[in-house]
Image (spheres, rainbow, N blue to C red):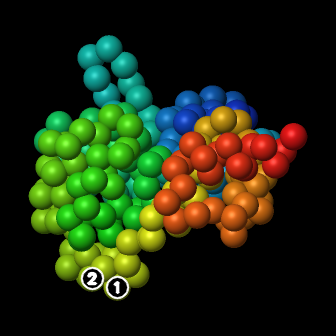
Amino acid sequence: MIVFLDGVLEEKEPTRVVVNVGGVGYEASIPLSSYDRLPEIGQRLRLLTVPVVREDAHLLFGFMTAEERTTFLRLTSVNGVGPKLGLAVLSGLSVRDLKAAVAAGDAKRLGGISGVGKKTAERLILELRDKLGKGDLMEALAGGAPGPADAKLRDALLALISLGHKPADAQRMVKDVAGQIAPDSTLEEILRKVLSGRK
């Protein structure tokens, strides 16, 4: 079982990386949260992994933190949640935001993630509450779920990264307009304001 890759980052995209380990290129699918933490191409990288073997494919999923990998394993242990949906959840919410949504029973927040319908959101809440320790749930509730404006700003940041902007640039772009965002602004309005500032 491959539990981590330690090598040189050859390629990176918001959803995948290629790591050169001793002259062999390993491709791994990653969540956007891990993409934020990747080094520059050509630099050394240690990527935690979860291999998935199917009849038709051998897949590798990569994570920059142990917390992300643990959360991915918990997500994929939920009935009806496969690896791709597990990555989608981690791309749509940070681990902390996910724990907060589960702790608060916020099916609407989970249902806003691409590929997660109402029934899946409710199943995630029901099953993850049992899998997350009381400490995790208390920490999530103490930290509190982000306010609507904060959640939308994070969504805008992730959208910019998926459009090809560098994480540092995307953070600066969102930060530049953060003070001009009304609490009831939609994600589309936020992105329009961010992108109009680039012209």
Q: Is residue 1 above or below residue 179?
A: above
Q: Dividing the picture into quarters, in which one does residue 57 lie? A: top left
Which residue bears the numbered disc 1?
Answer: 142
At x 45% / y 70%, what residue is drawn?
147
Q: Residue at x 56, y 30 (%)?
A: 27
Q: Is residue 11 above or below residue 149?
A: above
Q: Is residue 56 visible?
A: yes
* Residue 67 in picture, x, y percent from top left: 42, 64
The residue labelled by disc 2 is: 138
Location of residue 100 by image quarter: bottom left
Nearest the eye: 64 or 119: 119
**Residue type, mark 1 in image:** Ala
Question: Residue at image x 24%, y 39%?
Answer: 117
Q: Badges 2 and 1: C-beta atoms under 8 Å apart?
A: yes
Outermost residue, top side: 56
**Mark 2, secondary structure of its residue:** helix
**Dot 1: within a 10 Å radius of its alpha carbon, few (fewer than 14), some, or many (20 or more) residues?**
few
Task: Report crowding for label 2: few under 14, some 14 to 19, many 20 or more residues within 10 A (C-alpha).
Answer: some
**Which residue shows up at 84% across the image and 45% down it?**
198
Percent across and percent down for residue 77 are 20, 47
Q: Look at the image and tell me in which quarter the C terminus lies.
A: top right
